[in-house]
Image (cartoon, rainbow, N blue to C red):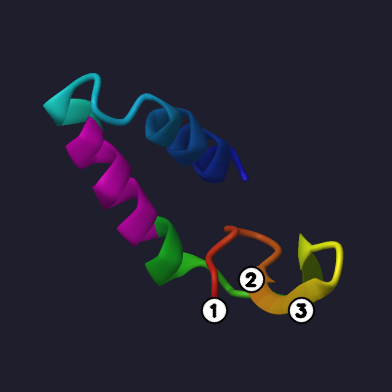
């Protein structure tokens, strides 16, 4: 989870520094490669009348 928090922090600073952008991309690839994914399914509201089902890893937050 520490790596996921670090990735999220770096992604929030995207565009501020090319080296940080490269580190964020590499960290994302590392997390996705080594995560023992636990995909969950969730329903999100698109509008008051419309919802959409999404799936994501509860550990690394990768969308499936």
Closer to the N terminus: mark 2 or mark 1? 2
- Residue at the image point whose x is 24% and y is 28% from the top: 15
- Residue at the image point whose x is 54% and y is 45% from the top: 4
Task: Please name the residue that numbered disc 2 is placed on.
Answer: 56
Q: Is residue 27 magenta?
A: yes
Q: Residue furthest right?
A: 48
Task: Please name the residue that numbered disc 1 is placed on.
Answer: 64
Closer to the N terminus: mark 2 or mark 3? 3
Q: Residue furthest top?
A: 16
Task: Locate residue 55: give its quadrant.
Answer: bottom right
Task: Please name the residue that numbered disc 3 is placed on.
Answer: 41
Q: Residue furthest left?
A: 18
Q: Is residue 58 magenta?
A: no
At mark 1, the secondary structure is loop
Secondary structure mainly formed by the magenta segment: helix
Using the image, tell me which numbered label, if any, was put on residue 47: none
Gap in angstroms between the C-alphas marked 2 and 1 = 5 Å
Q: Which residues are magenta?
A: 21-30
């Amino acid at each position: 989870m520490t790596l996921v928090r670090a990735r999220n922090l770096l992604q929030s600073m995207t565009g501020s520094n090319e080296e940080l952008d490269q580190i964020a991309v590499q960290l994302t690839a590392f997390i996705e490669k080594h995560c023992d994914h636990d995909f969950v399914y969730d329903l999100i509201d698109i509008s008051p009348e419309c919802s959409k089902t999404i799936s994501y890893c509860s550990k690394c937050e990768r969308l499936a």
